[in-house]
Image (tube, helix red, strand yellow):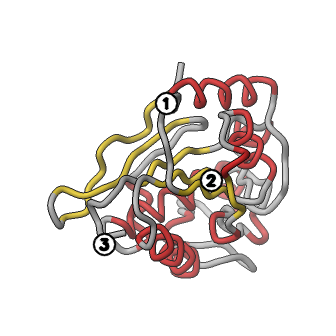
């Protein structure tokens, strides 16, 4: 897909117990809460009538269940590069808890011990972008907060650590595309009531 041939619709999964508590949830496969399931259904309402040439979802259950409850399970393909950042030793911990040991810690700047670097996450995002560029038409990506933020930075031709500038709540929708040959954000962090 040439930039501009279609849009990339980014959908962050619905709420989980860990996301509600602010815990870093990378590879731990936690399910949606009841509220998360309600949110996922609302995403389906927001996307009603949209047709996608391709639907990709992280294979983790919170993203796949969001995709399913939004009504796109029949057309979805699991995409391992859309899994969340591997937080290593910080998996399941809150930022406040980590900062008690490492004052001023930032995931984006300081990284995580025994997990992925921001550059590694950026390379995964680049592979997803390369894949969706080969598709004619709009593409939906069901994933996680940090990987979708990194993917957005890379779409905009920014370094992966600039994903820190794109806050993304659970069960929100964003759209990437282009204006002429320039990659842009068409909408961002849009909640589905």
Marks 1/3 in contact by CB < 8 Å: the verdict is no
Is 184 on the left or on the right of 66, as rendered? left
Residue with the mark numbered 1? 49
Task: In this rendered view, identify the residue nearer to me: 116 or 94.
Answer: 116
Residue with the mark numbered 2? 143
Task: In this rendered view, identify the residue nearer to me: 173 or 16.
Answer: 173
- Mark 3, other Cα within 10 Å: few <14 / some 14–19 / many ≥20: few
Question: Earlier along the polypeptide chain: callout 1 or callout 3?
Answer: 1
- Mark 1, other Cα within 10 Å: few <14 / some 14–19 / many ≥20: few
Q: Quadrant of residue 189?
A: top left
Image coordinates for residue 163, horizontal then vertical, percent: 43, 61
Residue with the mark numbered 3? 157
Q: Nearer the viewer, mark 1 or mark 3?
A: 1
Image coordinates for residue 186, horizontal then vertical, percent: 29, 45
Marks 3/2 in contact by CB < 8 Å: the verdict is no
Q: Nearer the viewer, mark 1 or mark 2?
A: 1
Is 171 on the left or on the right of 76, as rendered? left
Q: Residue at x 39, y 70 (%)?
A: 154
Q: Residue at x 62, y 58 (%)?
A: 56
Image position of 37 with respect to 101: above or below: above
Image coordinates for residue 65, horizontal then vertical, percent: 77, 42
- Quarter of the rendering occupied by the N terminus: bottom left
Cα separation between marks 3 and 2: 20 Å
Marks 1/2 in contact by CB < 8 Å: the verdict is no
């Amino acid at each position: 897909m040439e930039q501009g041939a279609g849009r990339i619709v980014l959908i962050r999964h619905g709420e989980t117990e860990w996301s509600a508590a602010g815990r870093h949830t990378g590879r731990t496969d936690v399910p949606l809460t009841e509220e998360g399931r309600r949110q996922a259904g609302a995403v389906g309402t927001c996307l009603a009538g949209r047709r996608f040439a391709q639907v990709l979802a992280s294979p983790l259950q919170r993203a796949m269940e969001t995709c399913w409850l939004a009504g796109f399970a029949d057309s979805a393909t699991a995409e391992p590069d859309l899994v969340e950042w591997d937080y290593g030793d910080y998996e399941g911990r809150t930022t406040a808890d980590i900062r008690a040991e490492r004052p001023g810690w930032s995931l984006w700047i300081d990284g995580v011990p025994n997990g992925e670097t921001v550059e590694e996450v950026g390379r995964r995002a680049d592979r997803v972008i390369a894949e969706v560029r080969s598709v004619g038409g709009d593409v939906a990506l069901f994933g996680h907060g940090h990987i979708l933020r990194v993917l957005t930075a890379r779409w905009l031709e920014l370094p992966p650590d600039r994903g820190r500038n794109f806050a993304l709540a659970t069960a929100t929708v964003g759209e990437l595309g282009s204006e002429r040959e320039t990659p842009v954000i068409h909408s961002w962090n849009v909640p589905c009531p």
